[in-house]
Amino acid sequence: MPYGCREKAYKRNENRVRGEIIYYTILLERIIDSYIARHFFPDTESDKFHEVKKFLIADRMEFSKKIEVFKEILMIECVTKEVFNQQYPRFGDDFKEIGNTRNDFAHGLSLMPPNKDLNKWEIILYKYRKEQPEPYSKEKIKECLEKIFKYIDRFSEGGTHVQIGK
């Protein structure tokens, strides 16, 4: 069945939202790659820094393993678990949610809502882990992006600030 103007606009927006979530999660992942490599090779201009980042971290480790290493490095820097928990109280929950959201947006099947709900949801994804559709409102998308931006801002070299899109 061909789409009308409203359906096409919905699909364009859906693709934009999906792209934003994936793009910013990848950006966060690359920042974490650099953070891990910098722990072992502080000279970011050195060949070793770039070799470790490229050959051992970026291309060889899955996201969840990077987060485990990243957490261990942060715990070393914090000296005690108590300090880590004070500085990063939601670290585990946030990164679990960020990883799951990224996977849902990268691999989830998007569903077209009924015409009456086209303006209600930004995107509806069929989540295979739950075996059910999950709608995302503008507010929920904003919350997802803000969680990602929080860590991008905190750990990017030079404190790059990211703005939420339209």
Image: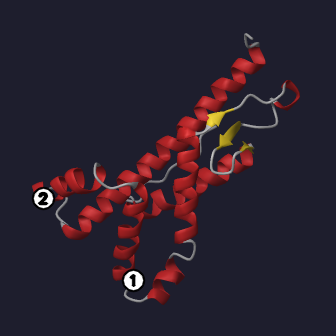
Residue at screen point 11% across, 54% down: 47
The picture quadrant where one finds residue 71 is bottom left
- Image coloring type: secondary structure
Point 50% across, 79% down: residue: 87
Which of the image's four quarters has the N terminus? top right
Q: Is residue 82 left or right of residue 37?
A: right
Q: Which residue is denoted by mark 1 in the rendering?
A: 78
Which residue is most to the left?
47
| Label drawn at residue 130 | none
Image: 75 above or below 139: below
Where residue 11 appears, x then y in whole percent?
67, 25
- Please state if 2 lies on the left or on the right of 19 as rendered: right
Identify the residue under disc 2: 48
User: Left or right of 147: which side holds 41?
Assistant: left
Q: Position of residue 55 (x, y in %)?
A: 20, 51
SS class of the residue under badge 1?
helix
Is any atom of residue 66 visible in this view?
yes
Label 2 – label 1 distance at C-alpha: 25 Å
Number of marks drawn: 2
Q: Image quarter for residue 36? A: bottom left
